[in-house]
Amino acid sequence: MRVLILAAMMLTLLACAHVSKHQSTQPVTKAVGHGMPDIDLTTAIYEVPVKQGVSYQDLVDSLKSLSEGMNFVNPANFPIGEHMKQRGVDPQGIKEVRSFCNLSMGTEIILDHPEFLVFAPCRIAIYEKQNQLYLGLDRPTYDLKSIKNPTARAVQSAQTLEDALIQLMEKARRGDF
């Protein structure tokens, strides 16, 4: 009986050692700084609350002004909440998506991996939940994980683009111009 118990204990220890040996040492978050939440590297979504006192219109004006100053164009907006209202559905606050494009930052990705176009242009959502206004980003670096064997140039380009969009969000959530 002792032999069986000892064998079971050894198998358990070996199994635990085997699992921990193969666990990822990759970080699951990345610090942003400036009072911004860390990036959860396990998801495509990066979400930040808008500072109290910054209205929806302040946020929209800020995004417009800041993005133009950063050489982004805003080719399309989708007021999802308004479309929900037209169908008789209460959107429960603001719900919209704004697209942003900066070809000087994203050209390398598209040239190396034209299939990445399915993720273009970059999108920032404005929405309310629990009476709090938020900005949410579909992270280009996470989207690039869908591309098999991305080039180093595409990886760098996606990171540069993501960093710029997070900088835009950081300033816009405070209502900066």
Image: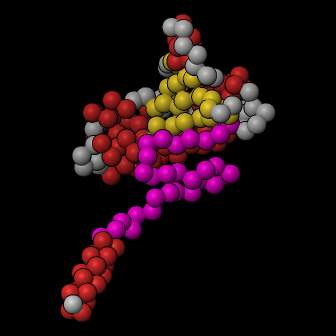
Residue at 48% across / 30% down in the picture? 123
Seen in the picture, residue 147 relative to 69 is either above or below; the reply is: below
Query: Taking the image as drawn, is residue 108 in sight?
Result: no
Q: What colouring style does the render use? A: secondary structure
Q: Quadrant of the N terminus?
A: bottom left
Residue at 52% across / 57% down in the picture? 30
Query: Taking the image as drawn, is residue 80 in sight?
Result: yes
Closer to us: 17 or 153 = 17
172 is within the stretch colored magenta: no
Residue at 25% across / 87% down in the picture? 5
Closer to us: 30 or 150 = 30
Residue 98 position in % (x across, y down): 53, 24
- Examine the residues drawn in magenta and state their main secondary structure: loop
Q: Quadrant of the C terminus?
A: top right
Residue 150 position in % (x across, y down): 28, 47
Residue 99 position in % (x across, y down): 50, 26
22 is within the stretch colored magenta: yes
Range drawn in magenta: 21-50
